[in-house]
Image (tube, helix red, strand yellow):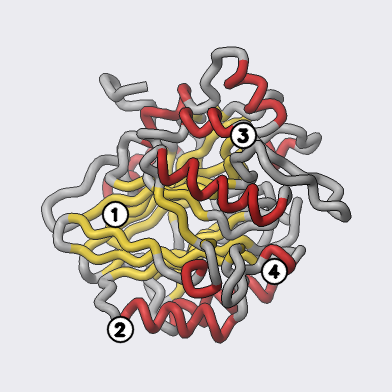
């Protein structure tokens, strides 16, 4: 995207961008989506040593009415590592404490939720629930896995759908066994339409898709995202590649292809050490405004705000994303 000069940027910031993400006005709801959260390895060692990998970005998380992330590992003591996977993760259950009060819901629709088997997967759902964190994109059976996350605030009914399409497919839920929601195009569209029919003002699919390390979406991602908008999605949000993949506006609605990492270590390329938070302001007509907020991730997997960084943003009526400078952390917000 084009980098804006100082005077042009100032004008566009006033006209098009969110100067500072805030809680919603009457009749609106603000949502925040985060990328991959993995609490094993480096982040797990940070927590075990008394540290808090989310402390530095807690003020950014606090700016939204409802916060959603992707739980990229089981939280469990049970199970055995998947015998054919190169990388498997399992975080200690007590690590969920850093999420409590900061995230309201976590998607479990990803390629690591089943790393330690079905028992560990079910244990993960229990730990999230006991911490006051809803889960979606997975469940005790196929029906539960495809059930939307419902958010009802300020007179709005919002449905969030979670799906994974990256192997192994053996993690998929079945009619009477636990697992995740698999992304089959027609099924996702059917779920989306069912949520609309059930009274959702807003429907947002959160998809685990794309190829790792690729900083641009595939043709398949672009085509499917647009199909979802055509079917009634208010926005489309993605993750999995461990890097950000840009954004576009299609039929007036934002598509953010990958948010990249949020809490994750072990990567040896710089693109994986930059992630986005997505801040959306919604009303009954859809997305009023949106902004991506950059975080830089250190070698321990801890994210830090990146004020002044230019990242995609937009508002209702725009034909293409603008770029906004990330705000300084608002003073006085809790850490």
Seen from the viewer's position, the closer of residues 299 and 90 is 90
How far apart in space, not on screen, are marks 4 and 3 (Cα)? 28 Å
Q: 10 Å neighbourhood of mark 4: few (<14), some, or many (≥20)?
A: some
Seen from the viewer's position, the closer of residues 141 and 54 is 141
Q: Earlier in the sequence, mark 1 or mark 3?
A: 3
- Reading the image, the residue beneath label 3 is 39
How far apart in space, not on screen, are marks 2 and 3 (Cα)? 37 Å
Q: 10 Å neighbourhood of mark 3: few (<14), some, or many (≥20)?
A: many
* Image quarter (top left, top right, bottom left or bottom right) of the N terminus: bottom right
- Reading the image, the residue beneath label 1 is 281
Marks 1 and 4: CB-CB under 8 Å?
A: no
Q: 10 Å neighbourhood of mark 2: few (<14), some, or many (≥20)?
A: few
- As drawn, is 261 to the left or to the right of 202? right
Q: Nearer the viewer, mark 1 or mark 3?
A: 3
- Reading the image, the residue beneath label 2 is 197
Secondary structure at badge 2 equals helix
């Amino acid at each position: 995207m084009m980098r804006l000069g100082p005077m042009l940027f100032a004008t566009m910031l006033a006209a098009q961008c969110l100067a500072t993400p805030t809680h919603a006005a009457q009749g609106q709801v603000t949502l925040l989506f985060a990328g991959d959260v993995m609490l094993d390895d480096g982040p797990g060692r940070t927590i075990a040593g008394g540290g808090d990998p989310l402390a530095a970005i807690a003020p950014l998380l606090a700016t939204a009415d409802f916060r959603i992330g992707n739980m990229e590992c089981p939280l469990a003591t049970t199970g055995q590592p998947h015998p054919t996977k190169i990388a498997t993760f399992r975080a200690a259950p007590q690590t969920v404490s850093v999420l409590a009060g900061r995230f309201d819901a976590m998607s479990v629709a990803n390629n690591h939720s089943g790393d330690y088997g079905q028992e560990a997967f079910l244990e993960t759902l229990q730990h999230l629930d006991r911490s006051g964190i809803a889960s979606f994109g997975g469940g005790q059976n196929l029906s539960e896995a495809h059930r939307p996350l419902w958010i009802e605030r300020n007179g709005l009914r919002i449905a969030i759908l979670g799906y994974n399409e990256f192997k192994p497919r053996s993690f998929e839920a079945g009619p009477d066994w636990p697992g995740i929601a698999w992304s089959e195009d027609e099924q996702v569209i059917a779920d989306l339409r069912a949520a609309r029919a059930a009274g959702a003002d807003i429907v947002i699919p959160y998809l685990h898709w794309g190829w790792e390390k690729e900083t641009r979406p595939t043709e398949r991602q672009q085509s499917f995202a647009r199909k979802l908008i055509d079917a009634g999605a208010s926005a489309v949000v993605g993750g999995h590649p461990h890097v950000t993949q840009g954004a576009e506006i299609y039929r007036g609605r934002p598509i953010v292809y990958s948010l990249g990492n949020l809490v994750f270590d072990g990567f040896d390329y710089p693109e994986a050490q930059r992630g986005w938070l997505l801040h959306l302001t919604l009303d009954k007509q859809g997305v009023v405004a949106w902004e991506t907020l950059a975080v830089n991730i250190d070698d321990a997997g801890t994210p830090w705000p990146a004020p002044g960084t230019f990242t995609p943003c937009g508002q209702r009526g725009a034909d293409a994303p603008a770029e906004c400078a990330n705000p300084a952390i608002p003073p006085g917000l809790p850490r």
